[in-house]
Amino acid sequence: MVKKMNKSVEYLKLSLQDDSDFVVREIESGKKDKIYIAFSESLCDSTSIYNFIISNIYGYLNFHKKIKDLKTLISGPKLMTLEKDEEMFYYLDNGFAVVIFKNEKYAIEVKAGLDRGISISQTEQNMYGPKDAFCENYQKNLGVLKRRLKNKKLKIESVDHGEYTKNKMAIVYLEDKVAPDVLENIKGVLDKYSDREVVDSYDIMKNFTKGEVFPTVLKTEKPAIAARFILKGYVVISIDNSPFALVVNAKFKDFVNPFTTDKFVSVLRYICFFLTVLTPAIYISLVNFNQETIPTSLLVSFTSQRMGVPFPAIVEAVVMLFICEILRECDIRFPSNYGSSASILGALILGDAAVSAGIVSPIMIITVAIAFITSLIFNEVKLVGAIRLLRISFVIISAFLGLYGLSIALVVCISILSNVKLNEGNYL
């Protein structure tokens, strides 16, 4: 018996000999036996280890010479009996302490509080709704969802992803609401890419979006939004170490028009989408090809503003759109106290200087500003990427084919939108 115990402990020590965070505590139990407590110091709470394991063992040994049944002494939120030595590494990396006694091995949950807790949403502002947001803690994220969906038909299936990361994620859905074929397809995708490493929710999104222009996976930081999607029959994936949940098989309307009771806001968001995509392309079409559609007085104004500008309208538009995207990225990446300074520099100083120098026409500044401002209403990264691609595609098509080419491109775009769906395939 002792020999088997020693082999398990020696295997642990040999495998983790270069890990300075790995600790093995030994407790004498009788003349020949020892109890070994193995844990990762940074992942575990020392107070929990003492309260759940060490104090119970010493309290028992004060009145008895040897331990007969270790399992009745140790306690914790979760207590797992391990059959194989390889299982020890999984639990050690997930904040468990492994207790080895003779040929017995147990894993006790003693996780340290390494997360930041539930806080206010930073990316999805809400004036009147709930203020809580997801955090990096897997159990807390599931908890805030279960607080909103109190029904036995709420199903939570846990899977691990990655050979090295072994990141835990949960597939959350309502059994009587979800479409069985969609659920099976999602499970098939996750199973197919189960060996891919997962550090953030973005790594999972890549498995569901393979070359699509429009996204089919929506990221949300708010449990209330995720709960609403679950009630509508969607599947939500919650990932450990990520403050964002993924709504899988989302439709275009879910990105453009999230849950709101204000019909005006709903219409406004659709108008903003078409304005941000089409405004530069329409201007270029009118100026280059379809001047007859512009009122004479307005056409004279356009012509006078463009006098002295050395570049064609297409070059102006592409350069200004490119500069606006740089400014947008600066606002996102810079600390908050620098972001406003970058916007002021780009919008006021560079824009005014470009017009004064005759490099860009004032009407082009207005056109690009309308496109840029109307895009700020959307904060989903994948949707913003799709808007960028559509906008530049429409601009290029309009530069060569005018309103005729723009009309064809718009019809193609709408047909693509109507057929956007989750990646499908035979994964089983």
Image (spheres, rainbow, N blue to C red):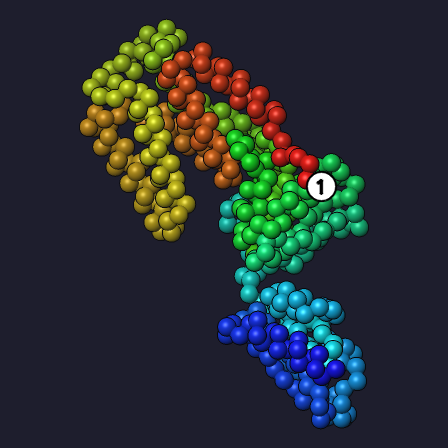
Is residue 345 found left or right of 29 in the rendered image?
A: left
| Residue that appears at 75% across and 49% down | 155
- Image quadrant containing the N terminus: bottom right
Give whichever of 326, 31 is nearer the camera: 31
Q: Is residue 67 visible?
A: yes
* 17 vs 93: above or below: below
Q: Position of residue 90 (x, y in %)?
A: 63, 64
The residue singled out by tag 1 in the image is: 428
Give whichever of 40, 278 is nearer the camera: 40
| Residue that appears at 57% across and 26% down | 417
| Residue that appears at 33% across and 21% down | 314
* 224 vs 110: above or below: above
Q: Position of residue 99 (x, y in %)?
A: 68, 77
Is residue 269 found left or right of 157 in the rendered image?
A: left
Q: Is residue 77 visible?
A: no
Instruction: Find numbered disc 1 in the image and state the secondary structure of the residue it sits on.
Output: loop
* 272 vs 398: above or below: below
The quarter holding residue 26 reads: bottom right
Give whichever of 259, 220 is nearer the camera: 220
Other-residue count near label 1 (Cα within 10 Å), few / some / many at <14 / 14–19 / ≥20:
few
Amino acid type at image mark 1: Leu
| Residue that appears at 66% across and 86% down | 27
Q: Position of residue 270 (x, y in %)?
A: 54, 27
- Image quadrant containing the C terminus: top right
The quarter holding residue 107 reads: bottom right
Q: How many marks?
A: 1
Q: Position of residue 372 (x, y in %)?
A: 40, 31
